[in-house]
Amino acid sequence: MHRSAPRLSRILACAAVPVMLVAVGCSSDSGSGSDAEKKAGSSSSSDSAGAEPTKPAVEPAKFTDLPDACTSIAKNTVKDLVPEAKKKGGTAGRSSDLAVRGSCSWNGLDDKGVKGSQYRWLSVAFTRFDSDQSLGSGAARATEDYTKQVAKEKASEGAQKAAAAAAPGIGDEATAITYQLNKTDEDFEYATVVARTGNVVVTLTYNGAGYAGAKTPSAADILKGAQKAAKEAVGKVDATAGAGSAEASPSAGDAKKDDKKGDAKPESEATPKS
């Protein structure tokens, strides 16, 4: 009896071992599952925090087309501003896409015999900008180009007495730049109106000179003529260009491409020999 007591104790101790191991194993599994869940949750939070926010869609371009530049100014206006124009219907400028760029020009010499001659030159150019998710809205792109065109006109080579002023009542915004320029031994008066309506920039230039003793036209008359023609051209855009929710198209970058190619430029300002 005394010998069997220690033996019984050892048997009970050995029998208890598997129970303890099972308990330890269950405790370990429970801990591992909790850690895995924590890691999964942490990874999900990290991925969510690293994702870039979606950019808001740009505003659709207001105009999706351009009017014919050579008919954008009324015939009577052309007749008044450019008497004896060589081509009554104007000379269209080159363009790879008339829905993006268009231009037209007129020039003529009104010969008064011994009283001298009056020369006039008129041109209008349109540039339309589409909305593009990477480049911005058509209106914003047109505003940027409008600013560049005004600066370019102010810095015209050889310009004298250059001045710039707002031209209210023409599009969303407009600036009139005036200056004098001497060429072919004559004094020319210049006026350029740069205007923006929606996503379209309109640049209109009018100039003139007196030949063979004729007086140089007044700066006020040249400016008045330029503003009248510019208002008509902008009105034509508003009236005839297709308006709507235009989505960005492959032609969105055409304006920049045309700048490099030199498309849609009005014909050179041919001047008569004195």
Image: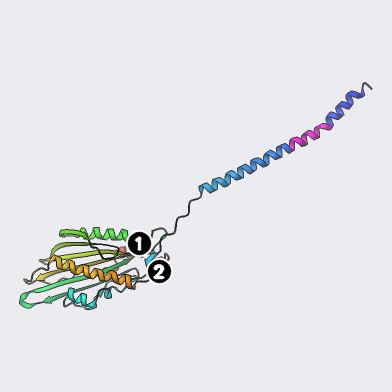
Q: Does 88 lie within the magenta span?
A: no
Q: Residue drawn at (24%, 68%), measured in percent from left and top?
A: 230
Disc 1 is placed on an element classified as helix
Q: Earlier in the sequence, mark 2 or mark 1?
A: 1
Amino acid at dot 1: Ala
Q: CA distance from mark 2 to mark 1?
A: 13 Å
Which is the main secondary structure of the residues drawn in magenta?
A: helix
Q: Is residue 141 above or below residue 110?
A: above
* Residue reaching furthest to the left: 114
| Number of other residues with Cα within 10 Å of mark 2, as a class: few under 14, some 14 to 19, many 20 or more | few
Q: Residue 244 shows which numbered tag? A: 2
Spot occupied by residue 241 in the image (x, y as percentages of width and height): 34, 71
Q: Residue 88 shows which numbered tag? A: none
253 vs 125, nearest the viewer: 125
Q: Is residue 47 above or below residue 223?
A: above
Point out the stretch of residues depicted in magenta: 15-25
Total marks in image = 2
Q: Quadrant of the C terminus?
A: bottom left
As drawn, is 238 to the left or to the right of 166? right
Spot occupied by residue 207 in the image (x, y as percentages of width and height): 17, 68
Q: Is residue 244 above or below residue 2?
A: below
**Can residue 14 be seen at all in this image of the molecule?**
yes
Residue 209 placement: quadrant: bottom left
As drawn, is 144 to the left or to the right of 86? right
Report the residue marked by disc 1: 139
Disc 2 is placed on an element classified as strand
Spot occupied by residue 218 in the image (x, y as percentages of width and height): 12, 67
**Can residue 95 be seen at all in this image of the molecule?**
no
Q: Quadrant of the N terminus?
A: top right
